[in-house]
Amino acid sequence: MAKAATSLVDKELSTLGAVLDPVELGNHLRPVLPTKWGALLDIQVQLLRHFPGKRCTIKITILTATGKYELIGKLYRRDRSDVFQAMDQIRLAGFGAEEAYSIPQPLVYLPLLNLLLYERVCGPRAKDFFGRDNEEHQALLAQRCALWLARFHSIAPESTRSISLRDQLIVCHERAQRVAGLGNSIAAKALKLSEQLEAAASGLSEVDTCAVHGNYRSGHVILSNGRTVVIDWDRHSVGAPARDVATFNVEMRRTARARLGSMRALDNLVTVFVRNYFDRNKLKVKQQLPFYEAATCLKIAGRLAGLPVRRSHGGYDEVNALLNEGLRSLEVQLA
């Protein structure tokens, strides 16, 4: 029997009711499901994540005449058919289901619902092991993450979206203003980092751009039966490859701080990741990496500063730690 996910209401997500209604969703799915799956017999919908006014992620379990299949659905507030198009092009470029380095295989985009459907990949995430497993296994996982990204930057087709250095600086300035709203010494530190980023940007040499993931971190890397699968393609674009490398490094340091008490506690794994990436990718990333690490720190700090739960003492400390890390990264570049 069809099973609903929830009665959740979100006025900004106008098609949410239809997506969470198994009967109505089934009517949309029947024409687009692979014919080899057979007739649709039952459908269940489970809400996984909800970002009010923006998007939500659901798990769809489908029972057909040939068996059970599972999909992930991402519902957006506006048309994001570009995400499906990018994923399909990446799949065709060498990241199919049979490849060791892969992505979730896209099924279809339903424009009437603003709903993206793709393969549900089962398995632990690389982040689950960092700071918790034995050092040898963690190093191997850091290497896998690096090899996936180096291959992606080398062969993935470019999308139609482009994120420039100036775009990055605009976001950094906005996030610095948000952090400044917390007041005290942290406000001056955020504005100082924003100013230093602006100054450092003028000294960066031009590098070849390529397809970038836009939010590459160990929490988006799934380890599944010999496949290394990277999820979450909402921020895909064309831009500086250093942006992806920097995001991974900064998120690894956040994991180190949360689990081991220090942002530097997993720097050996950051070194493994960076070394393996550089060994296989000749794009000029090294010179821009400190800048993008600092920019990533400021952007994350600004995002956290806007969350009410982060205005506690612990949240304030995390924002402060990110700003310190950003300033330290720029010192490395300017040294």
Image: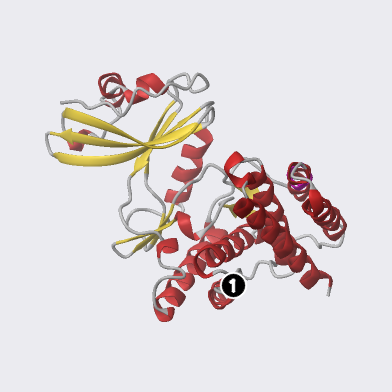
Report the magenta stretch's main SS: helix
Vertical arrangement, residue 96 with respect to residue 162, above or below:
below
Where residue 283 sits in the image (x, y, percent)?
66, 66
Q: What residue is at 64 percent from the left and 48 percent from the top? A: 238
**Residue 332 falls in image quadrant:** bottom right
Magenta segment: 172-176
Categorize mark 1 by other alpha carbons within 10 Å: few (<14), some (14-19), many (20+): many
Residue 288 visible:
no
Residue furthest out toward the front: 313
Where residue 33 sits in the image (x, y, percent)?
27, 32
In magenta segment, residue 175: yes
Q: In the image, is 118 to the left or to the right of 291?
A: left
Vertical arrangement, residue 242 with respect to residue 28, above or below:
below
Nearer to the camera, 102 or 198:
198
**Residue 64 falls in image quadrant:** top left
Residue furthest out toward the bottom: 136
Vertical arrangement, residue 36 with respect to residue 126, above or below:
above
The residue at which mark 1 appears reads as: 274
Q: Secondary structure at mark 1?
A: helix
Q: In the image, is 261 to the left or to the right of 105?
A: right
- The quadrant the C terminus occupies is bottom right
In magenta segment, residue 109: no
The count of marks equals 1
**Residue 1 falls in image quadrant:** top left
Q: In the image, is 60 to the left or to the right of 11?
A: left
Residue 187 visible:
yes
Nearer to the camera, 264 or 75:
264
Q: What residue is at 56 percent from the left and 74 percent from the top? A: 265
Where residue 133 sits in the image (x, y, percent)?
39, 73
Q: In the image, is 272 to the left or to the right of 88?
A: right
